[in-house]
Amino acid sequence: MKKTILTGILFSMITVVSAQNSAEKIIGSNEGLYIGGYGQIDFNLPTRDGSIHRNGTLDVHRFVTFIGYNFNEKTSFVSEIEFEHVSEVFVEQAFLNYRLENNMSLSAGLMLVPMGIQNLYHEPPTFNGVERTNVDKYIVPTTWREMGISLSGRSIQNSLNYKVMMVNGFNGYDGEGVFSGKTGLRSGRQKGAKSYITFPDFAARVSHYGYKGLNLGLSAYLGDSESTMYDGLDLSDDASVASADSTIIGIQMIGADARYKLGSLQFRGQYIVANLANTDQYNGKTNSDLASVIAGYYSEIGYNLLNSCETENELICFCRYENYNTHVETAGGLEINEDYNRTDITFGLGFKVAGGAMFKADYQILSNEGSEDKKGQFNFGTAIWF
Amino acid sequence: MKIVINISKVLIVTIGTLLLFSFSSVSWEEGKRDWKKINNSVDKIFGNADYNFIQFEIKQKNKFSKYYSIQKNDITIAYLITDKSPSKFHLFDYFVLCNTKSEIKKVTILNYREDYGGEICSYNWLKQFENNNANSSLEFKSKIDGISGATISINSLKNSVWFNTKNLKGFLGL
């Protein structure tokens, strides 16, 4: 059998001038520059708060350019440069990727932390609603990217993708406390801008896609936040060490998510919880109000109204219920602030006019447990990805 | 501060593990493995027998696509198409096996090069291509459900397979 194939290969190489009957030639090299991008342009219009008028805002919220380069079959560089609100420039990703095996690769540099759905899949046409979900903004917090190394791969037989990563932690203290009760860990992202590290943190994600239309994910993050107090610390000085120790937060974050798509119906849901240790000492040291548990979840259902029509366009109507609470539990007698227990109900339409281009419109009802009042907001936006 | 002391141990273990993986990758032989996958599929679908792959040219084709007739005793028993198609940052490699009527009997991903969208390698999902012989692009694509998180790769594969099999049909006068 094998001989015949080899003979066949040799035969075709001789008889067909253009024949290149070896897999190396079939596959060929894969060198070259790759340029792409995504973006979202938003118009947010809050409804009147009683007799109080609120202006709408128009914003080129984000525009991101991909620049990638394939050095050879195994080695590539990937980068994303982000312009946020026109004037803020960030490097969102910048890493070197090396394929160790066919289904396994090593990456090093500035990378997305694998937590939940939107931190990894945040290109605007991939999600419903003009804005990203607030669970992913206040609990995860997207776009969460840090410096480190990762190993990722897949098992096709078991329909599993996995990723493990070692990264620097959040900046929790740089002369003053960075975390807060309202925004949780969000302000502590170092984003690869002169990041510093005392404690390496670890992240991992596994997703399973074995059932038709269903994608299940489990994410975990474990580690301690960083503190500038450790730089130059005399380890023999117990008082200084104790003082520095009070400026870090132990973080255990776990997330579970599901996405289901079959025909015209689509569903997605996510739950994220983070247990934070040492918050009593941290709040005492920094005069902050960081909670010991923060959590959030959402559930969303969507339906493509054009599924049975003779078109590749999609008109998706959707509804999402979302709760995110950055004060689930507190330590050391800190009073729970019910204003931080927030609920959003969002419903709207997305008109996908091409694979990577979408017009969006939705209405959000925003409320929190600390108030009887509910706020409303219209959102209109364009979403692109190429 | 015990964690600070352990950081060096963590780095040593990590670097050691990565070095081990690096050495193991020396034995990676892409070409043989790809052909083995192709041969296994031909064996399963068209019977374990002696056959040759003869490449032929089609005028209108993708940059990387290659067309082969699979011949046994000088009689064509099937067709093989190999091609590259873009995922998010990279190109992935796949092959299609068709019978002599240009009906799709197998689609398999040979090499998928990036973390995102690897779900399209799923054998269960790829089965949706088999015997999908729709006459219009829209009907062809509508018969294949998407997977969340792999949108770009899925659309890319759908377009590429449709284009290649349509070309083969045209070449065969079907």
Image (tube, grey):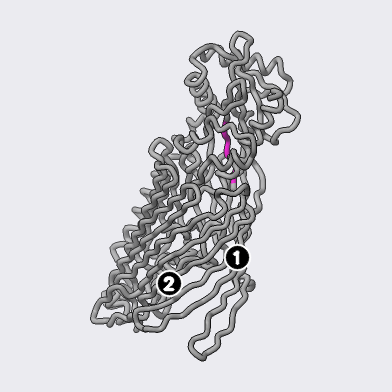
Q: Return the residue nearer the eye: A152 or B58.
A: B58
Q: In the displayed structure, does residue B72 sit left or right of residue B8?
A: right
Q: Which residues are magenta?
A: B90-95
**Spot occupied by residue A127 in the image (x, y as percentages of width and height):** 51, 59
Which element type, helix, strand or loop, lies under badge 2? strand
Name the residue located 52 percent from the left edge and 31 percent from the top edge. B130
Q: Are marks 1 and 2 on the same chain?
A: yes
**Is residue A262 positioned above or below A358 on the image?**
above
Secondary structure at numbered mark 1? strand
> Residue type at mark 1?
Gln
Task: Residue B94: say if magenta.
Answer: yes
Q: Mark 2 is on which residue type?
A: Asp
For the stretch drawn in magenta, the main secondary structure is strand
- Residue at the location (40% across, 53% down)? A258
User: Picture coordinates of residue A148 (x, y %)?
Assistant: 46, 56
Left or right: A260, with B32 as reference point: left
Q: Quadrant of residue B66?
A: top right
User: Which residue is pictured at 40% across the width and 67% down the height?
Assistant: A322
Q: Residue at x 66, y 48 (%)?
A: A33
Residue B54, given in percent of the width and then of the height, sits at 65, 18
Asked whether B128 or A38 is in front, the reply is B128
B157, A244: nearer the viewer: B157
**Magenta stretch: includes residue B42:** no
Does label 1 or label 2 sit earlier along the sequence? 1
Q: Which mark identifies residue A344?
A: 2
Q: What is the quadrant of residue A210 in the picture?
A: top left
Labelled disc at residue A40: 1
